[in-house]
Image: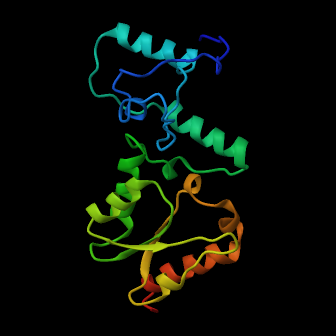
Amino acid sequence: MNTEKFNFDEIVDRRGTHAVKWDYCPSDDVIPMWVADMDFKAAPCIMEALRKRVEHGVFGYVNVPEEFHTSIINWFERRHNWTIDRDMIEYTTGVVPAISAVIKAITKPGQKVAILTPIYNCFFSSIKNNGCDLQPTQPSRTRVDTRGAQQGKRPVSQARCYRHQRRDSLRDGNARHELYTICIGDRRGTR
């Protein structure tokens, strides 16, 4: 395996490469900070693995290797001191299909899904594309405003995207529990 150090300082010009981040608004005076995309090369070990796969020359269907699951289990254990079962891991082709699969698995068309805004835009489309209704809930610096979720038909699920939301309001366990209770109450039939 290639153990070359990763170079975060190398500048790679991605303009003109069909990079959504840079070619969507091709202007030198615009800094595209609206999309989660990296502007440095993949790690040398990833480049090496891709080269090896390309040199093989056949790109048919493959099974997810056991190392995939083991690496995730080990990462959760190392980073969070949490031992997860292999059965808790579901392979998906990306974040957006995963969001859609989760919404489809835990809701029925017509049900509400509480979302803490701001949130990754694909949460909106994934919820709507699965026939569910949006219940935006705005977090503040001190708490999550659940008044909208408490009015009318309650949501049965909540979706959160920590990268887009203020951490202050989500650190409050009471606020998270309040929103959870609103959602779970509908599943128990206690509106």
The residue sitting at the front extreme is 29
Which residue is pictured at 37% across the width and 61% down the height? 124
User: Looking at the image, is 2 positioned above or below residue 184?
Assistant: above
Q: Front-most of 143 and 86? A: 143
Picture quarter containing residue 139?
bottom right
Applied colour scheme: rainbow
The residue sitting at the top extreme is 55
Picture quarter containing residue 126?
bottom left
| The N terminus, quarter of image | top right
The image shows residue 121 at horizontal and vertical percentages of: 40, 55
The image shows residue 105 at horizontal and vertical percentages of: 36, 63
Callout count: 0
Which residue is pictured at 40% across the width and 58% down the height? 123
Which residue is pictured at 30% across the width and 10% down the height? 57
Would residue 1 appear left or right of 126 to someone viewing this image?
Answer: right
Q: Front-most of 121 and 104? A: 121
Picture quarter containing residue 64?
top left
User: Looking at the image, is 88 positioned above or below residue 26?
Assistant: below
Would residue 184 appear left or right of 1 to someone viewing this image?
Answer: left
Which residue is pictured at 35% across the width and 9% down the height? 56
The image shows residue 87 at horizontal and vertical percentages of: 49, 50
| The C terminus, quarter of image | bottom left
Would residue 170 appear left or right of 148 to someone viewing this image?
Answer: right
User: Looking at the image, is 26 positioned above or below residue 80?
Assistant: above
The image shows residue 103 at horizontal and vertical percentages of: 37, 63
